[in-house]
């Protein structure tokens, strides 16, 4: 860890591994709502995220997938939850569940999990921030494993709650994992302007780039590429946003990591898409 702290400082003196969104060292492939002039005011986001073991993440790089609620009116207010491999954060190469927040556009506030005050873990939570997942994971051409999470504004308190849906639970079939208190934010405490479903890597340029998702491009589709399933947003009344709604792609390096089209179906996975790409992408060697 000490080695890491000295070698992966950005020019602004921050430890890159401690932050999710890094302007020059992170690559995303996902979908997001159209933003403040193109959509509704968002009060929540949910999805099933398939969980893959990602074996090729070097010590100072990371790779994962998350859902996020964002407000940029005052700079950047950003909350996210998902899965990732981040060796310098955990000192291992396991897939971990994570939460993240920041309220400044230079990422000088906020953190992953409970590394700083902010995210509050609920009593009775069945998944704690930073908890490693255990096999079985999704397998290429085989069974897909995932977790289903929901980030939703609590209309009574103004806090943003994080729920897990796939194991059932006492709150409408969900379990409360925790919440980001309203007091962390000035604008996000009213609503999100953008919701996002994103695969990401963060890459130290001295290391080979990690794979994203299953390590296969999105064109391989069901059972082979990683996916976000049942991607829904919640509107200002707290209802699932049902109208015809086309989120826009968000691809930083589509020749290395890309997304499929946005599929709208009536079966359980609802709106879904595939994402990802292999590691050692030549652009980053
Ligand atoms: C990212 O790179 C650009 C161009 O090299 C540079 O101007 C900018 O300051 C960098 N941003 C960060 C956060 O390092
Ligand atoms: C951002 O978070 C910090 C805590 O790290 C808090 O002191 C500050 O008031 C917050 N800023 C806003 C605009 O809410
Ligand atoms: C890459 O390695 C060189 C030489 O060891 C070092 O000067 C540079 O800061 C490193 N860059 C990153 C992004 O870690
Ligand atoms: C993604 O990138 C790969 C490799 O460049 C390409 O073959 C594929 O057509 C792209 N699009 C999708 C949807 O996979």
Image (cartoon, grey):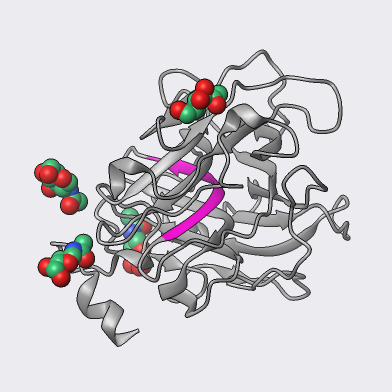
157 vs 281, left or right, is right
268 vs 224, left or right, is right
With respect to residue 162, does 250 lie above or below?
A: above
Where residue 208 appears, as percent x and y from the top left, is 35, 56
Where residue 26 appears, as percent x and y from the top left, is 35, 49
Residue at x-position 72% and y-position 30% = 240
Query: In the rendered image, which quarter is residue 15 located in?
Result: bottom left
254 vs 10, left or right, is right
Magenta region, residue range: 62-71
Q: Between residues 278 and 229, which one lies in front from this camera angle?
A: 278
Q: Find out whether residue 150 is within the magenta segment.
A: no
Where residue 86 appears, as percent x and y from the top left, is 47, 67
With respect to residue 234, does 284 lie above or below?
A: below
Residue at x-position 33% and y-position 42% = 282
Q: Give the farthest residue toward the bottom.
A: 2
Viewer can see residue 152: yes
The overriding secondary structure of the stretch rendered in magenta is: strand
With respect to residue 125, does 194 lie above or below?
A: above
Q: Find out whether residue 67 is within the magenta segment.
A: yes
Viewer can see residue 33: no
With respect to residue 54, does 78 lie above or below?
A: above
Q: Give the farthest residue toward the top.
A: 244
Where residue 253 appears, as percent x and y from the top left, is 36, 34
Residue at x-position 42% and y-position 31% = 251
Residue at x-position 69% and y-position 42% = 47
Q: Between residues 101 and 29, which one lies in front from this camera angle?
A: 29
Q: Between residues 211 and 36, which one lies in front from this camera angle?
A: 211
Name the image quarter holding the N terminus.
bottom left
194 vs 209, left or right, is right
């Amino acid at each position: 860890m000490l080695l890491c702290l000295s070698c992966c400082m950005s020019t602004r003196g921050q430890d890159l591994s401690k932050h999710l969104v890094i302007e020059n060292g992170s690559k995303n492939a996902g979908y997001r709502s159209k933003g403040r002039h193109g959509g509704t005011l968002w009060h929540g986001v949910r999805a099933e995220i398939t969980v893959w073991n990602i074996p090729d993440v070097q010590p100072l790089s990371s790779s994962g997938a998350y859902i996020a609620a964002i407000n940029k009116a005052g700079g950047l207010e950003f909350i996210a939850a998902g899965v990732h491999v981040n060796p310098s954060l955990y000192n291992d190469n396991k897939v971990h569940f994570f939460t993240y927040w920041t309220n400044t556009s230079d990422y000088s506030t906020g953190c992953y999990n409970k590394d700083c005050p902010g995210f509050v873990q609920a009593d009775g939570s069945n998944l704690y921030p930073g908890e490693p997942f255990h096999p079985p994971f999704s397998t290429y051409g085989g069974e897909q494993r995932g977790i289903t999470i929901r980030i939703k504004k609590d209309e009574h308190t103004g806090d943003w709650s994080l729920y897990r849906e796939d194991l059932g639970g006492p709150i409408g079939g969900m379990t409360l994992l925790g919440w980001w208190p309203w007091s962390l934010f000035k604008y996000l405490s009213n609503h999100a302007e953008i919701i996002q479903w994103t695969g990401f890597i963060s890459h130290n340029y001295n290391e080979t780039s990690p794979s994203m998702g299953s390590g296969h491009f999105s064109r391989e589709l069901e059972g082979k590429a990683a996916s976000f399933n049942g991607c829904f947003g919640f509107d200002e009344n707290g209802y699932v946003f049902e109208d015809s709604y086309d989120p826009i792609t968000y691809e930083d390096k589509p020749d290395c990591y890309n997304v499929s089209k946005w599929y709208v179906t009536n079966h359980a996975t609802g709106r879904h898409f595939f994402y990802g790409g292999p590691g050692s992408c030549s652009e980053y060697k």
